[in-house]
Image (cartoon, helix red, strand yellow):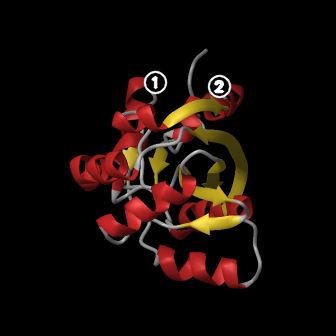
Amino acid sequence: MVQMLILASASQTRRDLLQNAAIPFEVRPARIDEEVARAALVAEGHAPRDVADALAELKALRLRADGIILGCDQTVDHRGMLLSKPETPADAVAQLGALSSGTHKLHSAIVAAQEGRAVWRHVATVTMTMRRASPAYLADYVDRNWPVIRHSAGSYTLEGEGARLFTRVDGDYFAVLGLPLLPLVDWLIARGEIPA
């Protein structure tokens, strides 16, 4: 029997990815204090990859519903340090300046839960290489894009003007957007939840 797929995320990008792939789902964002949970995991010494995985699981397990619940999270790993979403435009400019002309990693985690337990998980890691950008360009970029990038750890979105910040992206494009879509599709097909 095909199970209802429930996305425990308010992310419009994740919704768009599932809709564009013609995967039926409902949206029911998990209500958790993400900042408190993230801070606790960091204080306990968890690496950025493991923080993404743990937060995705927390979101998936928080909802109680029939069906398959998908929890997702993404972290930015800069030299082993976890970057958060910027609180102000000045924070965004500072983050981008620190990342400029260097390499960092994005960890995108997805956990599927059913009947109160995790039944599948995947963490995709993408290596992002940024070009050297002038402080003036970074300030202008943040000014033009603040309404969107304020919700993005790392202070950029690759699918928009943020593409100009990079010279190389090694890994799954969908994972950069916050949802490792291809492994999810494989898993759903293997379970018979969607046709192949």
Q: Residue at x 46, y 38 (%)?
A: 165
Is tag 1's residue or tag 2's residue first in the polypeptide sequence? 1
Furthest-top residue in this view? 196
Checking the image for residue 189, the label placed there is 2
SS for dot 1: loop
In the rendered picture of this protein, how many numbered marks are placed on residues? 2
For the residues labelled 1 and 2, the Cα–Cα distance comes to: 13 Å
Q: Nearer the viewer, residue 39 or 31?
A: 39
The residue where tag 1 is placed is 21
Q: Is residue 110 above or below residue 77?
A: above
Q: Residues within 10 Å of mark 1 (few under 14, many from 20)?
A: few
| Apparent side of residue 44 relative to residue 107 in the rendered image (left or right) | right
What type is the residue that disc 1 sits on?
A: Ala
Q: Position of residue 38 (x, y in %)?
A: 58, 75
Relative to 87, is 176 above or below? above
Mark 2 is surrounded, within 10 Å at the Cα level, by few (under 14), some (14 to 19) or many (20 or more) other residues, namely few
SS class, disc 2: helix
Q: Residue at x 51, y 54 (%)?
A: 66
Is 30 positioned to the left or the right of 143 in the image? right
